[in-house]
């Protein structure tokens, strides 16, 4: 089965590959059903990623030691236009 | 050789009183002072000189030395570092310029010079020229070439935006991203986007995001830019240092500076140029709804492919089941069963006979086999052993009982012969002897007593018998043999025995009467 930490890109690519494989009919029925189930898991992952409704905005700050850190940017501080 | 920078305060003003010599000769200093005075008086403090640059030299100190010339003459010029630093373009020989400054005398060299405060190219603006110059330089190095352009990720998970945190640009970008693709993470790197610090801050931000991309969780795309403004406001994005930072970035960069008409060096070096910040945001992220649709489409494709596949199999299967063999799969079996039944019937009799024979033979064989069988042999051996064991046990028991009996007998005899046993025997013998003795004596005595008694009885009897002979009788109660002496002893019907001299009479009391003494 697909792992949990796929990026949307990876999940989508895998899903496309799966769809093609199933459509081409070169794999057996049982395998195609297995692939279908994998595909549905990937569909769910893609949807989970896409369904994040609120934009997450953070601010990058340069630290004194040369590193960086991120600070959550509260929505109210975002400039309105 | 470096020339001393001119500093008027260091120059001692010539003393006018001392200048004219009495002999009509004047000193070099005096001439120079007079020239200086003349120039100062005659020329305005600021002049705008038009000419072509030649003999251009940038000294390591940062001061610029050049000559302005036209067809007829030349003018020596100096531009101090403090002013030279503000130049956007690089002065070069052959460049037509307008130099603004003041003409002064460099007394030590006896030369007048134009001290340039401001240098501008003729015909084009200095910024425009500067822009062209940077472009030419970077183009020559190949920084704008198409092969350096990195493709933008189709579905970025994290986008870094290097811009002013307070401008309209960031607001436009965030709004656009939120609308199109809210599932992305945005990292805002706040920088100054105009002013002297802007170029170094922007360049440093680009370098920093690249250097710390992993720490930031992976950055797929960067947007650098700002909203609209004058060419001076946008200038930082024309700076070479910014261009080089963009070129060096591993992360794809969208440049979005100002409005559509504004094209900066950053735009040319960046992987993609966006006309405006909003356009940059649109280029950066896809439309989520399209993707959701795309994913649904893919899901549908999978589902259709599988279900058509299953339908195909189902049809095939249905076709197979319509064939006779599969439709009635057992008919062939039933037919054969019938045949079997018939054959079986025919064979039944001979079979049972043979079966019987075979059984008998089997039984025999079984018996043989059982005898031969090691298990049976073992069993038999075991039985023999058990039997032997029993017999042995029996013999031993009997032997033991025998010995025990004889031992008991011997012990009895021994006991009998034992002195301890004989003593009570002897004692009892003595006792018995004594008893015999005692009883013999007693017997003798009783015999004597009896004899005496007999004699006595005979004497007595002879006494009352003689009375009986004389006609008296003795009446006794039959029960108790008491001599009846009084009627008090008698009752009606009582039986009495009356002894007479020659025999006895048995009688019954019929009437009892007492003598009335006092009648």
Image (tube, helix red, strand yellow):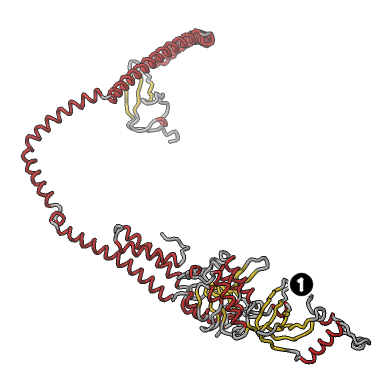
> Which chain's residue wears label 1?
B
Q: Quadrant of the N terminus of chain A?
A: bottom left
Residue ID for mark 1 = B2
Write the residue at 28% across / 22% down: B377
Q: Quadrant of the C terminus of chain A?
A: bottom right
The 10 Å Cα crowd at callout 1, few under 14, some 14 to 19, many 20 or more, is few
- The picture quadrant where one finds residue B235 is bottom right
Describe residue B238's horizontal placement relative to residue B379 as left or right: right
Describe residue B235's horizontal placement relative to residue B477 as left or right: right
Outermost residue on the right side: it is B22
Describe residue A3's horizontal placement relative to residue B218 as left or right: left
- The picture quadrant where one finds residue B390 is top left
Give the camera-side residue of B50 and B400: B50
How many dots with numbers? Answer: 1
Q: Secondary structure at mark 1?
A: loop
Write the residue at 21% across / 62% down: B315
Residue B193 pos. (x, y %): 61, 79
Does the image show residue B373? Answer: yes
Describe residue B185's horizontal placement relative to residue B87 as left or right: left
Residue B90 pos. (x, y %): 64, 77
Give the camera-side residue of B177 and B394: B177
Give the camera-side residue of B62 and B189: B62
Outermost residue on the left side: it is B346
Does the image show residue B469? Answer: no
Note whether B197 is above or below B329 in the view shown: below
Note whether B371 is above or below B353 in the view shown: above
Note whether B464 is above or below A41 in the view shown: above
């Amino acid at each position: 089965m697909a792992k949990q930490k796929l990026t949307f890109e990876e999940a989508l690519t895998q899903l496309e590959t799966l769809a093609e494989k199933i459509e081409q009919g070169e794999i057996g029925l049982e395998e195609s059903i297995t692939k279908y189930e994998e595909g549905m898991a990937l569909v769910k992952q893609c949807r989970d990623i896409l369904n994040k409704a609120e934009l997450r905005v953070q601010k990058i700050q340069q630290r004194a030691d040369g590193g960086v850190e991120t600070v959550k940017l509260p929505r109210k501080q975002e400039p309105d236009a | 050789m470096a020339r001393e920078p001119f500093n008027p305060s260091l120059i001692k003003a010539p003393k006018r009183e001392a200048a004219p010599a009495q002999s009509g000769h004047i000193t070099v200093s005096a001439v120079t002072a007079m020239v200086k005075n003349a120039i100062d008086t005659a020329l305005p403090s600021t002049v705008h000189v038009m000419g072509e640059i030649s003999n251009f030299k940038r000294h390591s100190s940062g001061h610029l030395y050049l000559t302005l010339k036209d067809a007829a003459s030349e003018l020596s010029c100096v531009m101090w570092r403090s002013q030279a630093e503000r130049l956007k373009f690089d002065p070069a020989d052959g460049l037509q310029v307008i130099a603004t400054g003041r003409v002064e005398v460099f007394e030590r060299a006896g030369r007048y010079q134009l001290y340039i405060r401001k240098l501008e190219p003729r015909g084009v603006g200095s910024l425009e020229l500067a822009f062209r110059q940077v472009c030419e330089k970077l183009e020559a190095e190949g920084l704008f070439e198409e092969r350096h352009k990195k493709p933008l990720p189709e579905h970025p998970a994290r986008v870094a935006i290097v811009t002013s945190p307070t401008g309209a640009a960031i607001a436009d970008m965030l709004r656009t991203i939120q609308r199109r693709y809210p599932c992305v993470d945005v990292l805002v790197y706040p920088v100054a986007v105009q002013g002297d610090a802007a170029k170094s801050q922007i360049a440093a931000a680009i370098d920093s995001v690249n250097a710390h991309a992993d720490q930031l969780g992976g950055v797929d795309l960067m947007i650098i830019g700002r909203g609209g403004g004058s060419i001076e406001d946008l200038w930082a994005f024309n700076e070479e240092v910014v261009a080089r930072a963009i070129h060096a970035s591993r992360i794809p960069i969208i440049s979005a500076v100002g409005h559509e008409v504004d094209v900066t060096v950053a735009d040319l070096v960046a992987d993609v140029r966006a006309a405006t910040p909003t356009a940059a945001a649109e280029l950066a992220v896809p439309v989520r709804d399209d993707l959701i649709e795309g994913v649904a489409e893919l899901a549908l494709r999978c589902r259709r492919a599988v279900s058509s596949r299953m339908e195909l199999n189902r049809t095939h299967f249905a076709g197979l089941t319509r064939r006779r063999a599969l439709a009635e799969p057992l008919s062939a079996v039933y037919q054969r069963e019938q045949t079997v039944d018939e054959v079986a019937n025919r064979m039944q009799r001979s079979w049972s006979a043979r079966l019987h024979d075979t059984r008998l033979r089997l039984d025999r064989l079984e018996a043989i086999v059982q005898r031969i069988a090691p298990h049976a042999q073992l069993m038999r051996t075991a039985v023999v052993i058990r039997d032997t064991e029993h017999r042995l046990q029996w013999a031993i028991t009997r032997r033991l009982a025998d010995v025990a009996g004889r031992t008991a007998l011997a012990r009895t005899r021994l006991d009998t012969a034992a002195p301890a046993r004989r003593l009570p025997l002897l004692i009892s013998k003595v006792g018995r002897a004594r008893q015999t003795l005692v009883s013999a004596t007693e017997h003798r005595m009783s015999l004597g007593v009896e004899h005496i008694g007999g004699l006595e009885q005979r004497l007595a009897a002879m006494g009352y018998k003689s009375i009986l002979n004389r006609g008296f009788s003795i009446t006794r109660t039959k029960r108790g043999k008491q001599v009846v002496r009084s009627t008090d002893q008698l009752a009606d019907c009582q039986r009495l025995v009356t002894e007479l001299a020659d025999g006895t009479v048995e009688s019954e009391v019929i009437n009892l009467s007492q003598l009335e003494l006092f009648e």
